[in-house]
Amino acid sequence: MSEVKVNKLSPRSGTTVTLGDSGDTFTIPSGVTLSNAGTINTGGLTTTGNINFGDNDKAQFGASNDLQIYHDGSFSRIKDLGTGALVLDTDGTDVRITKTDTEFMAKFVIDGAVELYYDNTKRFETTSSGALVTGRLSTSAGNASEPNFNFSADGNTGIYRASEDVIAFSNNGSESMRIDSSGILLINKTSAGLSTPGIEFDGSNNRAQFTRSGTPINVNRLSSDGGLINFYKDSTFFGAIKNDNSNNLIIGNATRGLKFSNTLFIPRDMDDTSSDNQVSIGSSASRFADIYLGGGLYVGGTGSANKLDDYEEGTHTADLNPSTSGSIALGGNENRLAYVKIGNWVHIQGQVNINIPSSPVGFLKLTLPFTSASLDENADHVSASVFVNNPLSANMNEFVAKIAPSTSELRIYLGDATSAQEDSAQEMRSGTSIAISVSYRTT
């Protein structure tokens, strides 16, 4: 029998109606509607046309309708209501999301990249080592405790936008570094300026600034001795700061420098070899003002005879005494002698005026500020130039004077005989003046 026509096929409740045998085909013509409020069980269903669902009519899968596919009138939906995962599984080349099957929106390549597109242009792609972004990646500003770019295991450490045109770096939730709107790198500070503590590197001005209450810069060379800081001008080396093998500091130009040790400040070639008698202090047009020395100055040589250990200028309040008896009082403001002492050589000059002589007898002894030296072979005897004005009776040119060794007095005699006469004291009277000029060696 090839065709059976019935108006209604109604099996009894609880019974099963089987249509056809294995291998038979049932054909439902176009336009025919199957209306079923129950369940149609089939061992398989093959169609050569479409299965059409109206709006909100769902293709449901699973014992509890866990997977639903339908159109709600506005949107097409695939809804997973089950307890497991929604799995898209392919054994082909890739999974694609497209627009009208002509433009890519996303592509998931088997054993390869995940690709995301903007208007059919690829902008994001995963790679074997990470991800690749083509174009610009923009985020919100973020903050120090929640930087936009951070690490999955350390969310409060990363990079964020502190303010307009300012990139900041946070560590453990606090800002540690930023690049400001002028391109200046700031470390442990938020604004540029020498008075603000922290470190800044100004690339546009090729300048680095370090500010803190303690030592701003520490330079530590490890193991070997040598350069600590080198200086260049237009790529040409012109100076350095370095240390020697005893941790003494050497500062200089490309050729010569100065070495600072515990007790010495000496000229030195920059290879730490001797630079004897090669360096001058100052020049004829660029002089130092003053030199303060606690010791001596070696001039023209390094021996003890070349040592200048003293320079002194001053005045000496002199006394004039007779050698035998009596006394002589000088004028209160007329008893000063001026001196200049260079090393162990002293020059004295000046004038004293007699105020009140009291029966002076003997030769005159005028006190000096320094004791004379005692030298071999009478090299220590010194004569002086004296000018005695208004003596009692002797001629002015009859007075002579000398300094004896190991004394601090100028002895004035009368020279009116073939030997010095010890009676010059008797020639003193009120109004007599004695001017002297003498140079001698001291102890």
Image (cartoon, rainbow, N blue to C red):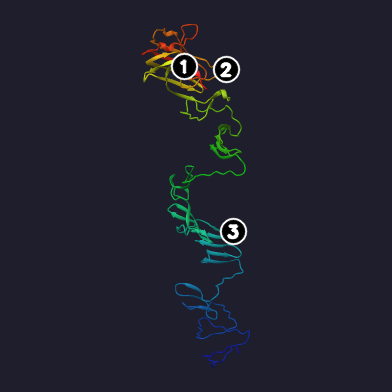
Mark 3 vs mark 2, CA separation in Å: 97 Å
Q: Is residue 37 above or below residue 196?
A: below
Say which of 270 and 262 sits in front: 262
| Residue that carries the numbered disc 2 in the rendered image | 376
Query: Residue extending furthest right?
Result: 22
Q: Residue 79: give x, y in percent of width and height.
A: 50, 74
Q: Is residue 224 above or below residue 354?
A: below
Tally the marks: 3
| Residue that carries the numbered disc 1 in the rendered image | 410
Amino acid type at mark 1: Leu
Q: Which mark is residue 5?
A: none
Residue 183 in view here: no
Which quadrant would the N terminus be assigned to in this image? bottom right
Tell me, yes or no, whether the two marked residues, 3 and 1, touch with CB atoms within 8 Å. no
Q: Earlier in the sequence, mark 3 or mark 2?
A: 3
Dot 3 crowding, Cα within 10 Å, few <14, some 14–19, many 20+: few
Amino acid type at mark 3: Ser
Identify which residue is drawn at 45% across, 55% down. 161
Q: Nearer the viewer, mark 3 or mark 2?
A: 2
Q: Earlier in the sequence, mark 1 or mark 2?
A: 2
Q: Residue 107: give x, y in percent of width and height.
A: 55, 64
Q: Residue 395: give x, y in percent of width and height.
A: 41, 7
Disc 3 element:
loop
Say which of 123 and 260 sits in front: 260
Q: Nearer the viewer, mark 3 or mark 1?
A: 1
Q: Is residue 420 above or below residue 63?
A: above
| Residue that carries the numbered disc 3 in the rendered image | 129
Disc 1 element:
strand
Mark 3 vs mark 1, CA separation in Å: 102 Å
